[in-house]
Image (cartoon, helix red, strand yellow):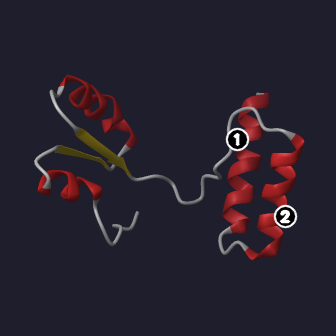
Amino acid sequence: MRTPAYRLVKVAEAFGAKGIHIDKAENCGLALQDALNTRGPVIVESEVDPFEPPMSPKVTLDQASKLGKALIKGEPNREKIALTVLHDKIRELI
């Protein structure tokens, strides 16, 4: 994953809050527990898979149609996103 141009964790720390950065899925549980146990403000930022489509578990036909149209219009990573959607659907059925 690439590092973003700005880090919300650094902004939080500059204002005296706690900042927690999650870079791997296996660290998520401990990081969230740390955030919940912290008194005062906390910012939790997480790296995500750029090829994971922003779809909820329950997708309406209208939402699926709009995703399809966006992919057709020229989403740069459309092949990887489409494969991820297909892979997720197959895992659901098995």
Rendered location of residue 49, percent (x, y): 51, 54
Viewer-proximal residue, 22 or 80?
22
Front position among marks 2 and 1: 2
Q: Residue at x 89, y 43 (%)?
A: 61
Image quadrant for the N terminus? bottom left
Task: Give residue 77's quadrant in the image.
Answer: bottom right
Circle 2: residue type: Lys
Q: Position of residue 48 (x, y in %)?
A: 46, 52
The kind of residue on which mark 1 rests is Asp
Quadrant in the rendering for residue 92: top right
Distance Cα–Cα, label 2 vs label 1: 19 Å
Residue at 71% across, 45% down: 87
The residue sitting at 80% across, 74% down in the picture is: 73
Q: Would you name the residue on which mark 2 appears? A: 69
Residue 35 lies, with reference to residue 68, above or below; the image says above
* In this picture, residue 86 sits left or right of residue 33: right
Residue at the (10%, 48%) spot, across then down: 16
Q: Give the residue pinned by disc 1.
A: 88
- Residue 66: assigned label: none
**Whole-percent x and y of residue 27?**
30, 37
